[in-house]
Amino acid sequence: MTELTTLIQRTRAAAISLAKLPSAVKNNALEAIASALEQQSAKILAANQEDVAAAIANQLPNSLIARLKLDANKLKGMIAGVRDVMRLDDPIGDRQIHRELDHGLVLERLSCPLGVIGVIFEARPDAVTQIAALGIKSGNGVVLKGGSEAVHSCEAIAAVMREALASCPNLDADLDVDRGAQVSPDVVQLLTTRAETIAILQMDKLIDLIIPRGSNQFVRYIQANTNIPVLGHADGVCHLYVDQAADLEQAVAIAVDSKTQYPAACNTIETLLVHQAIAPEFLPLVAQALQSKAVALRGCDLTCKILNKTIDIAAATESDWSTEYCDLILAIKIVDSAASAIAHITTYGSKHTEAIVTQNQAIADLFMSDIDAAGVYHNCSTRFADGFRYGFGAEVGISTNKMPPRGPVGLEGLVTYKYRLVGNGHIVADYTGANAKAFTHQDL
Amino acid sequence: MTELTTLIQRTRAAAISLAKLPSAVKNNALEAIASALEQQSAKILAANQEDVAAAIANQLPNSLIARLKLDANKLKGMIAGVRDVMRLDDPIGDRQIHRELDHGLVLERLSCPLGVIGVIFEARPDAVTQIAALGIKSGNGVVLKGGSEAVHSCEAIAAVMREALASCPNLDADLDVDRGAQVSPDVVQLLTTRAETIAILQMDKLIDLIIPRGSNQFVRYIQANTNIPVLGHADGVCHLYVDQAADLEQAVAIAVDSKTQYPAACNTIETLLVHQAIAPEFLPLVAQALQSKAVALRGCDLTCKILNKTIDIAAATESDWSTEYCDLILAIKIVDSAASAIAHITTYGSKHTEAIVTQNQAIADLFMSDIDAAGVYHNCSTRFADGFRYGFGAEVGISTNKMPPRGPVGLEGLVTYKYRLVGNGHIVADYTGANAKAFTHQDL
């Protein structure tokens, strides 16, 4: 057995104990982590400066350095995030079914942790505290692997968190909690090498869920190389369809927001679909608004014909319809009906978030029922597709899987359930054959 | 595009229409199917006789012929099953979240069908009606592939069902339903060749879920050869642990039921774990009871030592602990503690259903929290792990996946959800920056 396997098994054992701890103990551990992060801020910022200096020396992109860099304010935000998770409802022990199958034979379905979750992310050191907090709150062990650019930052943060757990003060004596039962530091493990990442993808007996956060290519690599369930999405090819019956001013504002509010986000639109009847009026308006935000446009033939006297626009090619630009680029296509818009989205969309602007309720209903996506939006920006904006208090990822959990996923994505059946010697033979007893099936 | 792809696309299109139909229309279609099956009973039984005659001529196993053979009574049961599904609550359109994010910006999470479900099963022709009924009720298209032994039966049943849908009478005029909106016969497709089965495993754009019903080897083949989510289980290596504090008489009855009530079922136990303190007293009792039901025993060294003066028992080898016998064979192992029993189950179990017999509540609690399985049972038979016994009214399969749906899965396994967000020109830019609006996050 390798050293890594032993390490993950320790996390698994710690997670089994964690699963049984009451909310008060888990919250106490989170408060200890938050306090320790406050007290050790200087140490964390110093480690981060090492990473940033190396990134600058290695001429890494500015956008990466911006995500990597911590300052006192960002660290405060991370600590506030840990306390936010503390205040969320405990997702464990929720009784979803409570049913008498027969006298003295009682079935319960109770939410329980998944076990151990592997989270693989890129440069952001703030992910370490967020994921660890979500893991502890939901009773799961977490194995973290950050980007190599952030290794000193991640190591410093993980060390502070593990020390905080190791020396976590006991709860007040008036809380009815076993003083010996504390959150083990082993519930949080940090990996630092790429070889370890690749190795854990094979540990389907020890790790229950992988959450990859990063580029499409990175997520696709993970999905293709593990039997462990993966929560996340590779592509975010989202569309906005501006219908014949749209309020055009509203449509312009929603198009600009959906494209430019954060171009690298997965819920940003990549293609704008426009009904032909309003294209001559709408396209110049939206094109001007987008260009004033530095968006480069690529249009279908008809779009280019309408726009190219006044606006700089390139011809879109087939590959544009399936590209997630992650940049200030937008493809535009004219369609002859809502049905054509739906057909285009069905062909090229990634089942993430799809929006329509229209004042026609019947067309909106058609769009929202026939589009197969985690989110279907009417008269609002696709950028709302986010766990915090949905009011989940935290987001563990956005899933484009068809099976639940789907869309922005809060703590429920880290939780499964167990059926517990308690009897008093009950056997199935009594419920079959000529003198079969009947089940009562009474919900309690 | 192949003929098969065109066929599945027709089913997909039919499923999109089906997804929008109200319960009354779906139930009307199910009643039409039930009536047609009654009227065409003779035709179905004649087709089945062809299959049975061929199976006898080909010297197929008696157990297979028993599953294959239909008679008037079995057919009545199948028809009653269709009407049972009709009476289940409609799982579609359930509003799981209804929340104002801000004034005029309302989020809903609504249950919706998965889309198209591929169900691949072995000899049983009764699966055709059951799965088609569950598919229609849950708004999904179903692509069915039965065992080649049952091809005439399946074809006859599918033809009757599709004709019933094609000529389904309209609903009473007083029901507020569009008379033109009916369930298309294309929602049910029957495939008949192995090549088609293999081909649909690659159609991850057209099929949303595969449900394989058959042998471990068959399910494992499916799991290894598709990117489509698979609902089901390969192994069912279930255990019964008889604790030091067990009521021995109860433990004998539960052991016999869990092993012999239906030996080929996935929820049947394969290994009996016995606490060493009670082994000398318990083992002779249970061994005698099991042998009177023709169960062959394989024991660990200590078990053989205790039993081999009085009882015929073979020595268990390492491979016995991970074998699903699907037969009247039981492995027995003596353990020194509940913790050892839990460790054994963690190593060899398949996360299906695990049971303990004990009068000690603390030991029961430990077992039920530390065992990672879809079902954890106390003082009752593992054979209760079943959707009908749980009161789900129908079972689409039993899942040993860690992520939900887990355990016996009813209609909810054929359902996912969509987020619908409706605004009035809402954009995310208004909720960020210096003058950011706040979300209200009020549940409605």
Image: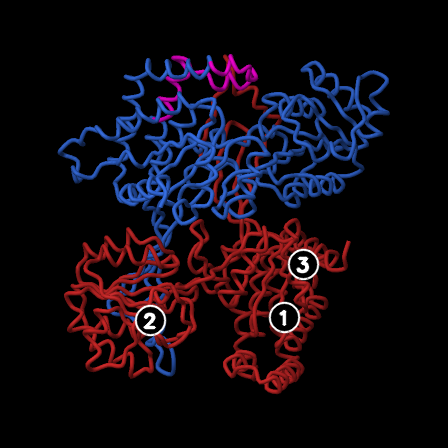
Chain colours: A red, B blue
N-term mark: 3 or 1: 1
For the residue pair A166 and A6, the one nearer the viewer reads as: A6
Q: Residue B235's x, y, as percent? A: 61, 36
The span from disc 2 to disc 1 (Cα, nearest Å) is: 37 Å
At label 3, which amino acid type do we have?
A: Ala
Residue at mark 2 shares a chain with residue at mark 1: yes
Q: Is residue A369 left or right of residue A149?
A: left
Query: Crowding near pointer 3: few (<14 within 10 Å), some, many (20+)?
Result: few
Task: Tell me the chain of label 1.
Answer: A
At a point 57% along the width and 31% down the height, the residue shown is B215
Task: Tell me the chain of label 3.
Answer: A
Q: Is residue A3 left or right of residue B378?
A: right
Residue A33's disc is 1
Q: Residue B424's x, y, as percent? A: 24, 67
N-term mark: 2 or 3: 3
Q: Residue A341's x, y, as percent? A: 25, 59
What residue is pinned by disc 3?
A199
Which element is circle 2 on?
helix
Question: Mark 2 or mark 1, which is nearer to you?
Answer: 2
Which of the 4 image quarters holds residue A320? bottom left
Q: Is residue B206 magenta?
A: no
Residue B307's disc is none
What residue is pinned by disc 2?
A258
Task: Tell me the chain of label 2.
Answer: A
Question: Mark 2 or mark 3, which is nearer to you?
Answer: 3
At label 1, which amino acid type do we have?
A: Ile
Q: Which residues are magenta?
A: B54-82
The span from disc 3 to disc 1 (Cα, nearest Å) is: 29 Å
Q: Is residue A444 visible?
A: no
At label 2, which amino acid type do we have?
A: Ser
At a point 16% along the width and 68% down the height, the residue shown is A278
